């Protein structure tokens, strides 16, 4: 095959020799091409002595051959005409080159996004422009020159049960500031959470109606927010110890009551020697009681079923069908234990 | 990595976004900078290499007393500033005269570096004739047995390919192929030659290629190398799953280059088939008698089938 090809080539070249030089390359098999990178690798061996003598000539001729080979294969690719120029679509590069930067990781979900995902809450698409009643035209929902901008009002009505001397403008401004601060805090907490570092504890985020729990937490934080970490803070009268301050570990004194220590050690040895299983009495009784109840209910059911529902059981679907939902009742009572 | 401090302006935000890792990466850009002492040759080499790589290159004009092989932190800092992942550094000392360091970075850390000594340099200016136009993607020709000697040299070849290959493109204009860079490795030396392509008539569609020396020409001798571990290199080669094109279903091409599509359809309901329109088969209009209307429609259905 190759022989016939070469014969054809030689005939073609001899016929064309008078006019043009050939585009055929000798030893083209040894030139590896990677069109995707516009790369040709010439694996022809060069004699060292010869190379030292005629460096430039050899470099020029070998490069020309490789380039000719590359061009021959590039001109075989499908051509498109784009704005008067002939453009070739390059194939995928064969030589792999390292990336500049690692493959981007997925952005970690925020706490809200995680929650929304678990609940199946989807974002509602809101239009960018909204109708502004005052100016009677469409304006952006947020940002510069937004619709229904409440910062531009020149008068604010004092609410019925508000302090008449309170500055409503300042109040609004303050509320906005707090919302921004809260948002920033949540952002930082999300970052800390995603990096698995310790999420900084927060005393109390601004809330409309703080619960008793939140208030006592705030109190505990306020107590400790002094230079001496609350060592000299006065207690309120009748104040209970806070539930939000951690417990301190207590250790037995290393020197002291020998008798109690001896007793403890002996107790330990005794239990180990007997290999008695540890029993949590409360747990054990609970379990026993529940088992009793279950057996009782099962007996109750088995007494009922033979008369009522036999069709499905008899057909062999029994276990699945009866296991699906037992007991009647409405949504609220379903799943609760029957007495 | 998430930033704790938010950018203050939109412009700053966009600039940071441009530097972030992407699935489809932009062309690698190159940083050229000089060491504390440079010779005329080294400076000229840096300048001319900069012109060859220009739209995707940055040149630092001032001296920077740093040694990439001793301490990589400066290189990493400079390249992060100009968001480039390739660099060329030149310096000159008694111990290493006319020194040239070519390197690349991955994840803003030095991956591979190779040090060369410039033995011979012919400037672009010293070669007469027209030059290839600026900013085009060069064709690369590698030859010589140096690059196949061992794994390290193979990596150096990969580094040189990465360094000189120019912008990543999908399409290339055939008339725009006018620059060929030849890199020949033999006897521990690397010969870099630049040629301009002259396309001559050949009697067929494919042109006959003639080359004309354009400069710069460099004879380099390989000195030190600092190559990444195979493990790290493998990690740098990783391609994202999303970058692979999705397989297109039901579309095929025949030998003539025609695009064929396979369509899946529901079974046809012949009862609703619109055959030739005949007056006798036409539906009658609504009948005036309200009581008979139901019967009429039923009869018509029977007729149709």
Image (cartoon, rainbow, N blue to C red):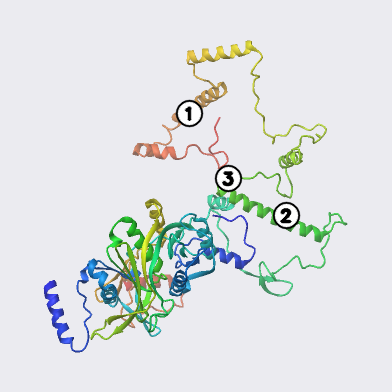
Q: Dot 1 corresponds to which residue?
A: A300
> Mark 1: few, some, or many residues within 10 Å (few <14, many ≥20)?
few
Position of A47 relative to A279 (above/below): below
Chain of the residue under label 2: A
Which type of secondary structure does the marked residue at label 3 adopt? loop
Chain of the residue under label 3: A
Q: Which mark is residue A61?
A: none
Spatial distance from mark 1 to mark 2, Cα to Cα?
60 Å
Instruction: Specify whether A200 is left or right of A178.
Output: left
Q: Residue B45: x percent and y percent?
A: 44, 71
Spatial distance from mark 2 to mark 3, Cα to Cα?
25 Å
| Mark 3 / mark 1, whichever is N-terminal | 3
Whether pointer 1 and pointer 2 mark residues with C-beta atoms closer than 8 Å, the reply is no
Q: Residue A197 carries which label?
A: 3
Rendering quarter of residue B163: bottom left
Which type of secondary structure does the marked residue at label 1 adopt? helix
Q: Residue B122: x percent and y percent?
A: 39, 75
Position of B263 relative to B67 (above/below): below
> Mark 3: few, some, or many residues within 10 Å (few <14, many ≥20)?
few
Figure quadrant of the N terminus of chain B: bottom right
Rendering quarter of residue A184: bottom right
Q: Image point 71% across, 75% down: which residue?
A: A136
Q: Which of marks 2 and 3 is in front?
A: 3
Q: Residue A95: x percent and y percent?
A: 33, 63
- Camera sees residue A46: no
Q: Dot 2 corresponds to which residue?
A: A178
Whether pointer 3 and pointer 1 mark residues with C-beta atoms closer than 8 Å, the reply is no
Position of B150 relative to A319 (above/below): below
Which type of secondary structure does the marked residue at label 2 adopt? helix
């Amino acid at each position: 095959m190759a022989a016939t090809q070469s014969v054809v080539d030689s005939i073609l070249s001899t016929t064309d020799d008078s006019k043009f030089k050939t585009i055929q390359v000798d030893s083209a098999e040894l030139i590896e091409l990677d069109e995707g990178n516009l790369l040709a690798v010439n694996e022809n061996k060069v004699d060292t002595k010869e190379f030292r003598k005629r460096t430039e000539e050899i470099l020029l001729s070998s490069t020309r051959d490789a380039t000719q080979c590359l061009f021959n294969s590039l001109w075989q690719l499908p051509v498109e005409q784009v704005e008067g120029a002939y453009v070739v679509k390059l194939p995928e590069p064969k030589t792999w080159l390292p990336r500049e930067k690692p493959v981007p990781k997925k952005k970690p979900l925020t706490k809200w996004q995680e929650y929304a995902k678990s609940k199946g809450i989807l974002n509602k698409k809101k239009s960018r422009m909204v109708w502004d009643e005052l100016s009677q035209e469409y304006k952006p929902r947020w940002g510069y020159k937004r619709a229904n901008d409440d910062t531009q009002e020149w008068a604010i009505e004092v609410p019925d049960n508000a302090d008449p001397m309170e500055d409503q403008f300042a109040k609004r401004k303050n509320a906005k500031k707090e919302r921004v601060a809260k948002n920033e805090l949540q952002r930082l907490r999300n970052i800390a959470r995603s990096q698995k570092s310790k999420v900084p504890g927060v005393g109390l985020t601004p809330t409309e109606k703080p619960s008793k729990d939140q208030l006592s937490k705030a109190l505990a934080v306020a107590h400790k927010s002094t230079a001496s970490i609350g060592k000299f803070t006065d207690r309120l009268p009748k104040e209970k110890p806070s539930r939000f301050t951690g417990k301190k570990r207590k250790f037995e004194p290393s020197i002291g009551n020998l008798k109690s220590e001896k007793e403890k050690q002996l107790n330990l040895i005794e239990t180990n020697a007997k290999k008695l299983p540890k029993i949590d009495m409360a747990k054990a009784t609970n379990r026993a009681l529940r088992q009793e109840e279950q057996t009782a209910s099962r007996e109750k059911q088995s007494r009922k079923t033979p008369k009522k529902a036999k069709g499905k059981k008899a057909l062999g679907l029994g276990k699945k069908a009866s296991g699906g939902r037992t007991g009647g009742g409405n949504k609220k009572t379903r799943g609760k234990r029957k007495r | 990595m998430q930033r704790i401090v938010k950018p203050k302006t939109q412009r700053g935000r966009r600039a940071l976004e441009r530097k972030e890792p992407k699935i489809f990466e932009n062309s690698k850009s190159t940083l050229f900078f000089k060491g504390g002492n440079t010779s005329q040759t080294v400076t000229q080499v840096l300048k001319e290499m900069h012109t060859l790589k220009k739209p995707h290159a940055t040149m630092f004009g001032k001296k920077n007393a740093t040694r990439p092989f001793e301490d990589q932190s400066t290189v990493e800092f400079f390249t992060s500033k100009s968001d480039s992942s390739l660099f060329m550094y030149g310096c000159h000392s008694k111990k290493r005269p006319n020194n040239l360091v070519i390197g690349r970075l991955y994840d803003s850390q030095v991956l591979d570096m190779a040090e060369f000594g410039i033995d011979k340099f012919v400037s672009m200016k010293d070669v007469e004739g027209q030059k290839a136009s600026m900013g085009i993607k060069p064709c690369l020709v590698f030859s010589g047995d140096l690059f196949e000697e061992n794994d390290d040299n193979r990596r150096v070849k990969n580094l040189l390919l990465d360094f000189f290959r120019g912008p990543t493109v999908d399409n290339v204009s055939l008339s725009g192929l006018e620059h060929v860079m030849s890199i020949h490795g033999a006897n521990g030396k690397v010969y870099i030659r630049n040629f301009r392509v002259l396309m001559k008539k050949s009697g067929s569609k494919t042109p006959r290629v003639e080359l004309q020396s354009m400069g710069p020409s460099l004879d380099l001798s390989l000195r030190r190398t600092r190559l990444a571990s195979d493990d790290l290199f493998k990690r740098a080669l990783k391609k994202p799953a999303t970058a692979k094109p999705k397989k297109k279903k039901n579309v095929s091409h025949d030998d003539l280059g025609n695009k064929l599509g396979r369509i899946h359809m529901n079974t046809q309901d012949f009862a609703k088939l619109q055959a030739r329109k005949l007056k006798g088969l036409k539906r009658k209009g609504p009948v005036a008698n309200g009581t008979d209307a139901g019967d009429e429609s039923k009869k018509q259905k029977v007729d149709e089938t």
